[in-house]
Image: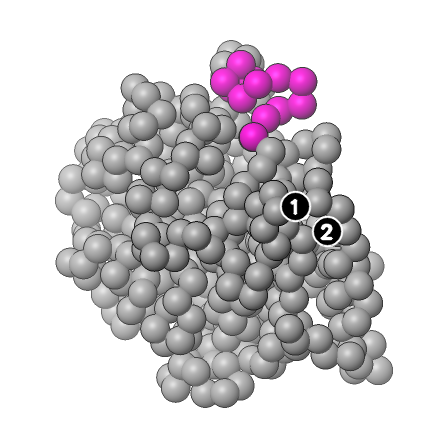
Amino acid sequence: MVIDPRFVPVVHRFFRMFARPTRGGGAFAVYLHGRPVVDVWAGEAAPGRQWRHDTVALSFSTGKGVAATVLHRLAERGLLEYDAPVAEYWPEFAVNGKETITVRDMLSHRAGLHRVRGLTATPDGLLDYDAMVAALAEGVADPRRTQGSGYHAVTFGWLVAELVQRVTGDEFTDVLRREIAEPLRTPEFWYRVPESERPRIARTFPRLRVPGLRWDAASALIARSRVVAAVAEAGMPAGLDALVVDPRLHDAVIPGFNGVFSARALARMYGALASDGRTADGTPAAPLLRPETIAVINRVQHTERRDYVLGVRVPFTLGYHRPPVLSRRPPRKAFGHYGVGGSGAFSDPELGMSVAFVTNRLGNSFNTIGDGRLARLAGLAQAAVLRDRV
């Protein structure tokens, strides 16, 4: 473990979160100016099995930020341009009025392809990458996309991954390894998890649900609502609750929600993005992304309207969002991605800090969708850095 004395209060808070077996387990990591200052873990990865230094966890939408970082590495080398039409790289995409949708639109959730509910006849269809990508290419964009963002809760990952494949000619998982894992010398960036590494995955619990209702019943009910139907369309496909705990999930590539990471790996990646693209030990030797690229991808794209899926204004940057942090001084330039259940990671370039949290315990006793654990830990970590500056 790594515990810098300045961060003892936040580490104490983290350990208290997993004081009882019913709370499961998790890991928490902080990098400051490219160096690890916190790397801790606690609780149970599964009943009777303690969380270890090498435990990894399904982290849901946290993986969107990792996938976006892969794409930015390619854009930086000129393989694609943010304001070019997606169809320039993916010709099949240019149907049903989608010819003008740009890479920037896609990264800022303005492609109008938020619907995953109904994209496949059965839940197993979500495991078929080629079928899902083909369905999105043939799809009709929601006209509300021209007025504001519509959170692509699941489909975002397929759109990014296919664009990566189109501009490189290689499988997304191979490009991910080459562009992120190998430069950072950190292998735990997985969507399709190697068989040899699967015993390391923490067991996710409890089953996804909406308070008072089973998943499929809640999904069907919400989908019929004129006010919040888009929530079900974007993030509540039938059978998702069962798929989350199905071992076949780790054979698939669904970067919108099936990323498996360690907190250490996420903090290392975002730590590089908080330090002008570099880690303090020189890994990678060249910046993960150049400072000018980080400045571009960290600009909030649109805030003038509420997100038509989530119903609130969301400060989306290019593939990330401003993270909620429980603090009197919320970070102004932080960017990253949170996931269902509570996991997440982000970079704060103003402090030179990154924070990452992964857990197998979805939410709390009232709500499995999310909670404030990461926001609280991040606020304490920020306070530690600010105190040190005084």
Q: Observer-nearest residue: 105 or 38?
A: 38
Q: Which residue is mark 1?
A: 24
First to last magenta residue range: 207-219
Q: For this view, does 219 lie left or right of residue 131?
A: right
The residue lying at 63 percent from left, 70 percent from top is: 39
Q: Is residue 285 left or right of residue 216?
A: left
Tell me if residue 372 is in the magenta stretch.
no
**Image x and y of residue 351, in percent:** 66, 74
Camera sees residue 171 = yes
The amino acid type, in three-letter code, at marker 2 is Phe
Q: Looking at the picture, tell me which residue is in the foreground, 112 or 159.
A: 159
Marks 1,2: beta carbons within 8 A = yes
Lower sequence index among marks 1 and 2: 2
x and y percent of residue 19 in the render? 77, 51
Task: Report the residue marked by disc 2.
Answer: 18
Residue shown at the point (46%, 55%) measured from the top left: 200
| Crowdedness near tag 2: few (<14), some (14–19) or many (≥20) residues, C-alpha within 10 Å | some
> Within 10 angstroms of label 1, few (less than 14), some, or many (20 or more) residues?
many
Give the residue displayed 26% in from the left and 51% down from the top: 163
Q: How far across and how far down the image is residue 315, in percent?
A: 58, 50
- Secondary element at image label 2: loop
Q: Quadrant of the C terminus?
A: bottom right
